[in-house]
Amino acid sequence: MGFVRDLLVFLHILGVGLLIGTLLLQFKQESLNKGWLHGSALQLLTGLALMLLAPLTHAHYNHVKLGIKLLVVLVIGALAFVYLRKEKVPSWLTPVLGGLTVLNVGLAVFWHGS
């Protein structure tokens, strides 16, 4: 079970890497990059899988922190879904998506409270 958890954590980290990479690419594009949707989906699915495996791996998680992280990734995914069909991205969208991504990474790294 340890290998499965490690694999999910690996994929979860790749998901945030995809979001950060998409942020860097987005500055040069007029339409929204599909990487936002793919990265947020990867983050969502691997995060939920890690939570479901928690009882089997004896992992203990801060449920408030994870609830906030879930909300943030859902907002990223929803914004990406809504604006993927638009030809031009609003000027506020890229900084908001980037800020939400950085917020999620910050929550993961710095919030250790119980």
Image: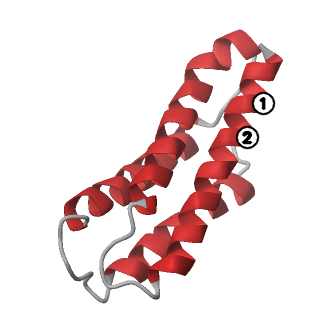
Choose between 105 and 41: the one closer to the eye: 41
Answer yes or no: do the residues labelled 1 and 2 have beta carbons within 8 Å? yes
Provide residue 3's location: percent of width, then percent of height.
81, 21
For residue 89, above or below residue 49: below
Visible residue check, residue 1: yes
| Amino acid residing under circle 1 | Asp
Location of the N terminus by quadrant is top right
For residue 65, above or below residue 2: below
Count the marks: 2
| Amino acid residing under circle 2 | Phe
Provide residue 12's location: percent of width, then percent of height.
63, 43
Question: Left or right of 58: which side holds 27?
Answer: left
Provide residue 9's location: percent of width, then percent of height.
71, 37
In percent of the image, x 43 and y 55: which residue is there?
Answer: 72
Give the residue pinned by disc 1.
6
Residue 88 occupies quadrant: bottom left
In percent of the image, x 38 and y 61: which residue is there?
Answer: 34
Visible residue check, residue 114: no
Residue 62 occupies quadrant: top right
For residue 44, above or below residue 20: above
In percent of the image, x 56 and y 36: which residue is there?
Answer: 47
Location of the C terminus by quadrant is top right
Choose between 105 and 10: the one closer to the eye: 10
Choose between 104 and 81: the one closer to the eye: 81
Secondary structure of residue under mark 1: helix
Give the residue pinned by disc 2.
10
